[in-house]
Image (tube, rainbow, N blue to C red):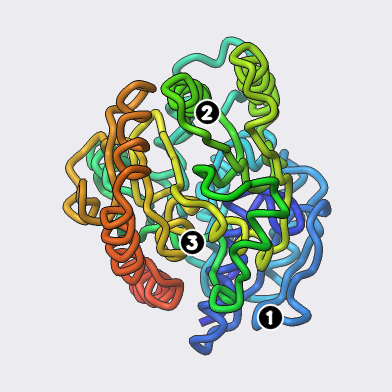
Amino acid sequence: MKICLISGEFPPMQGGVGDYTHELGQAMADQGHEILILTSVRAADQGANSGYRAFPIIDDWGWPFWKKLRAFCQREQPDLVNIQYQAAAYEMKPAINLLPWRLRLWPAPRPAVAVTFHDLLVPFLFRGAGPVRRWSINYLARSADGVITTNEEDSAQLDTRAPGTPRRLVPIGPNVMPRSRAHVDRPAWRKRWGIKGDQLALSYFGFLNQSKGGEELIEALAKLVTEGRDARLLMIGGRVGASDPTNLAYLHRVQALIARHGLTDRVVWTDYLPEEEATATLMASDICVLPYRDGVSTRRGTLMAALVHGLPVVTTQPRVPLEQFRDGENMLLAPPEDPDALAACIARLADDAELRQHIGAGAEMLAQRFTWPAIAASTLEFFAELITE
């Protein structure tokens, strides 16, 4: 198959959707398919050392984008166009939401169109848009030939919001792979980040935003320190992504909370790291803490990265039952937005080396369900069905 992936962000732009598109494109190309990636001019052509071809040519995700896509498809003739959808990645503009409808107006033969929903958050569109914003998401799903969701909760919502559209649930894979894990000098990396002796090193991986529980994380750290624990927190990766401007305001709130609790010397910001350094820094930590306000789910690439590195993870209870996430077996689960419970879970792991080892091993075993070859194979199978239909 010849497949065009559309993504509003792509490396070196920082963002989970861009990382996902890169990994998916590479994995599908490895399985023998021709992959084209259409993305922003702010990105770069990563395809020189990859199996896909990247086209960073879109300078406006508004209505002019339609014309560029039409010319691109006439030249390249893809079998299917796959929109990697997250509202912020497309500058909150509605052209992407109406794209499946527009493609259906093209004369035959036209490419099939599938939408991968990284979340169902509504776009801003314009002041006073109100119900139109939710309608724009529903219409995007209803007018596509097929949709992919990355988690059970979004899939259940689309049962009622787009009941007639073929759908498949395909989880997200890790956005950092432990390719150099066996060669990590853990003491040296702890020293690099100022972690001394047997200090408790916590890690948080990924950008900060409203849904990821940064404030609860800092409150939990403050409680641990008050209890007499010599803890440090590694904030690994870029502080905010390239797409959503609201993340910066949230970062400032978290930084203010750190200062208010007198934790500035205990929080280390690594900022963006190359993949090998991100792996080494994750491995230098003792416990990874990911307190998502909307609960743990299969749509979190940062969670998958922690799991594949075999880290003991403390996160939050899912909104819907998820049999694969097992409290005490492959992670510890605290109630969302509860810093005291979060701190208690961290303390429990900190005091029990055997439990840390057990949960780390369970995490690594769980990560085998979320490999990129398996994700690509499931996605390709679904695309083949859509093209045939």
Residue 33 bears which disc, if any? none
Q: Quadrant of residue 53?
A: bottom right
Q: Is residue 181 above or below residue 148?
A: below
Disc assigned to residue 174: 3
Q: Is residue 33 above or below residue 355?
A: below
The quadrant of the image that shows the C terminus is: bottom left
Q: Which residue is mark 1?
A: 50
Q: Between tags 1 and 3, which lies in front?
A: 3
Q: Earlier in the sequence, mark 1 or mark 3?
A: 1
Q: Is residue 344 left or right of residue 253?
A: left
| Residue 24 place in picture, x, y as percent | 53, 69
Seen in the picture, residue 150 relative to 136 is either above or below; the reply is: below
Whole-percent x, y for residue 380 in the image: 41, 75
* Amino acid tagged 2: Gly
The residue wearing badge 2 is 214
Q: Secondary structure at mark 3?
A: loop
